[in-house]
Amino acid sequence: MSAPGPDPVSLLVYHPDGAAPYAQLIRVPAGREVTIHACTTEAEAAAVIGDVEVAYAWKLPPMLYGKAPKLRWLQAIGAGVDWALVPELPSRVVVTRAPGVFGPWMSEYVLGWCSWITQRMETYRAAQRQRRWLDDVLPGRLRGKTLTLVGVGDIGREIARVARAVGMHVIGVSRSGERVPAVERVYRPGYLARALAAADFVVVVVPLTKKTRGLIGERALAAMRPGAWLLNIGRGAVVDEAALVQALQTHRIAGAVLDVFPTEPLPADHPLWGLDNVVITPHVAGPSTAEEIAPVFNDNLARWLRGRPLQHVVDRARGY
Ligand code: OXD
């Protein structure tokens, strides 16, 4: 008679927009048994969560944590983990992120919209609609412009690398102020205004934590140059929205490209919709795809099943 193998592991894949694509790409190492529950609603997840040890999820409803006595590990699908680090999350649960997946998307988003500004794409397209040959208006260059990154984690670093490649100057702001590749100078938060004042483009890419909520408020916006643009691809609540609307309406800054908002979807009657110096995109700067995140999860799953330490563990005290 052979010895019994290790106990089967119960795994919840949760994604409100569809869990099946993520579940299908899970690779279970030979010799191990994993029961996979793919759920898209809270009710479906509530029916199985009692046995679940591992969750691979996007925006897992917090009420489920109280019904999950065996939950030990949560792999976040998505760039941010603020939705996971709620008071209901038991301290025994390790949360892991997926670095490396979102930076390439978000750097294209940032460089794309910066080019939309400098290349005056809107102006030429408008002239085209009027059949006008607009040869007295010239595009600008990204080369030589300064991009300030508020946040230089893995996503910020990738943006810095790409921005440097087109000849931009890159400045950063981070908690530690430590040097970062491709970033010419990193300031601590106490010098935020100085970093903002140097920028043609300010890119907000910090996680939402107690310390970053409302970080870009009236004073920060006042420190920016009148010709500068703000791009927010982190979390809406990092920017004080009322102060931003005011700065845009009064042309205190040139404009904003906004992918994230404190309330999503952005309500139809929100003043931002009506401002001509604002670009609104619906939280798409760094989309999650099952194909890109699967290797990160599968590597960690193999570690978990072998009892080895997980990679990319979130520091819950810091919030990222
Ligand atoms: C996010 C994401 O965390 O879209 O915002 O992945």
Image (cartoon, grey):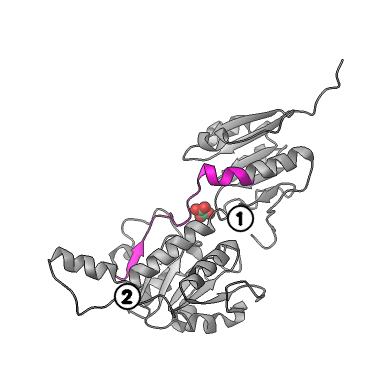
The quadrant holding residue 44 is top right
Taking 154 as reference, is 287 above or below it? above
Q: Which quadrant does the N terminus fall into?
A: top right
Q: Residue at x 32, y 75 (%)?
A: 249
Magenta region: 277-296
Front-most of residues 240 and 206:
206
Mark 2 Cα shell of 10 Å, populated few (<14), some (14-19), many (≥20) = some
Q: Residue furthest left?
A: 131
Does residue 225 show up magenta in the picture? no
Residue designated by label 1: 99
Residue designated by label 2: 249
Q: Residue at x 59, y 33 (%)?
A: 46
Residue 40 in view here: no
**Residue 12 percent location from the top left of the image:** 62, 35
Does residue 289 show up magenta in the picture? yes
Q: Earlier in the sequence, mark 2 or mark 1?
A: 1
Residue 173 in view here: yes
The amino acid type of the residue labelled 2 equals Gln
**Residue 161 percent location from the top left of the image:** 54, 68
The amino acid type of the residue labelled 1 equals Pro
Mark 1 Cα shell of 10 Å, populated few (<14), some (14-19), many (≥20) = some
Mark 1 CB near ligand 1 (8 Å cut): no
Q: Please, what secondary structure does the residue beneath circle 1 have?
A: loop
Q: CA distance from mark 2 to mark 1?
A: 36 Å
